[in-house]
Image (cartoon, rainbow, N blue to C red):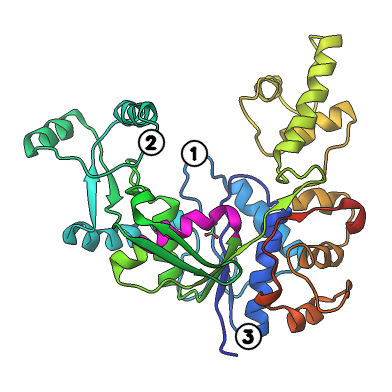
Amino acid sequence: MAPVRTRFAPSPTGSLHVGGVRTALYCWLYARKTGGQFLLRIEDTDQIRSTDEATRGIVRDLQWVGLDWDEGPVVGGSVGPYLQSERLPIYDAHLAPLLASGAAYEAWDERSELDRLRKEAEARKETFLYRRRQVTEAQIAAWKAEGRKPVVRLAMRPGPVVVQDEVLGEVIVPGEQLDDLVLRKADGFPTYHFAVVVDDHSMAVDLVLRGQEHLMNTHKHQGIYEAFGWRHPRVGHLPLIDNQKGVKLSKREKAQTAREAARQRLQVEPGWRPLTTTPEAFLAFVDKKTDAVGTAEAIAAALDVSLPLIEVMDYRKAGYVPEALLNYLLLLGWHAPGDRELYTLDEAVEAFDLDRVNKKSARFDPVKLR
Ligand code: GLU
């Protein structure tokens, strides 16, 4: 088997979800099995939601479970930097030829204009799809003088966009159903879509494994690969993880539990405030204005309620053994030959393959994990 480079590319907008670790585990196993490399890349292009604290948390949680990376933050590597916010000149350099060839173009619409177009499409019972609009040079000059900044969009081509998925098989979407997607935002930052394509290509990633919620993104990415004349790396989408009620396992469950408990307490004692966080953070949380990292935990601690365990740090703090968590996650989305249930990491490297990754959603069973 040829060595395969895989990567785990979390966005540091919160702490690491067990689903994220499962993705990291499968990527790690595949790289180790083939004698390739496992990369960690931090996708912090969302300037508003990304935090350094979350990046540190991801690094700490991966270290705790014992998935070591060959290239990435802390360890470095030859195709870095591995934080997207430090790669802006690389994205700009890649955008220039696409603009020059007409594969990408500047679009000057303000949000209110896009909202109007979206509403008009809704009134016609159509899905809103952005396509290039004709504007005059004089109009552009006037917008520039106003200080308006354009976004850069990809001109999506018509015709079927075919993705050969390692888990799901062939998935075809007509290009006519895909938006002219934004590559660079008005703040000068690339979108996730553009950065992920430039990075996977320039970091020589061979195999992309990520959750099924990204499947439709892959068709958009295919459009960007084509515009560059590059080949899409192999790609596989992993089954979603549901909770016991069959609803996608989400960090929001923690926030909901803490918020509900806080509201009940406020009904009894309206002036009550936890000592574990600031009154402002508490009130903003109760009003659903924020789900900042750690606020749900702080409130739960003050109220002495227990929250569902969803993020890796929940398991770490609750005293779970990382090997057990990884063993459980291995089997959540992959079925072993026979009914074998217990694996060391080395044994998992030996046994793991993509053929046995499931297509259907997995149900997270905390009792089995325990
Ligand atoms: N930054 C994306 C996320 O955290 C990663 C998706 C990908 O692996 O391409 O959802």
User: How far across and how far down the image is residue 5, in percent?
Assistant: 55, 77
**Left or right position of 14 against 362:** left
Q: Which label number is shown at residue 48?
A: 1
Q: Residues within 10 Å of mark 1 (few under 14, many from 20)?
A: few
Judge whether 81 appears above or below 35 on screen.
above
User: How far across and how far down the image is residue 113, in percent?
Assistant: 29, 28
Quarter assignment of residue 102: bottom left
Closer to the camera in the image, 23 or 269? 23
The amino acid pointed to by label 2 is Glu
Which residue is located at x 76 percent, y 81 percent?
A: 351
Closer to the camera in the image, 364 or 252? 364
The amino acid pointed to by label 3 is Thr
Q: Residues within 10 Å of mark 3 (few under 14, many from 20)?
A: some
Which residue is located at x 71 percent, y 20 percent?
A: 279
Location of mark 2 (residue): 126
- Are the residues tagged 1 and 2 within 8 Å (C-beta)? no
Q: Quadrant of ligand 1?
A: bottom right
**Left or right position of 299 against 88:** right
Closer to the camera in the image, 153 or 17? 153
The amino acid pointed to by label 1 is Ile
Location of mark 3 (residue): 34
Q: Which label number is shown at residue 351?
A: none
Q: Nearer the viewer, mark 1 or mark 3?
A: 3
Q: Residues within 10 Å of mark 2 (few under 14, many from 20)?
A: few
Which residue is located at x 60 percent, y 57 percent?
A: 212
What residue range appears in magenta? Answer: 211-223
User: How far across and how far down the image is residue 150, in percent?
Assistant: 25, 40
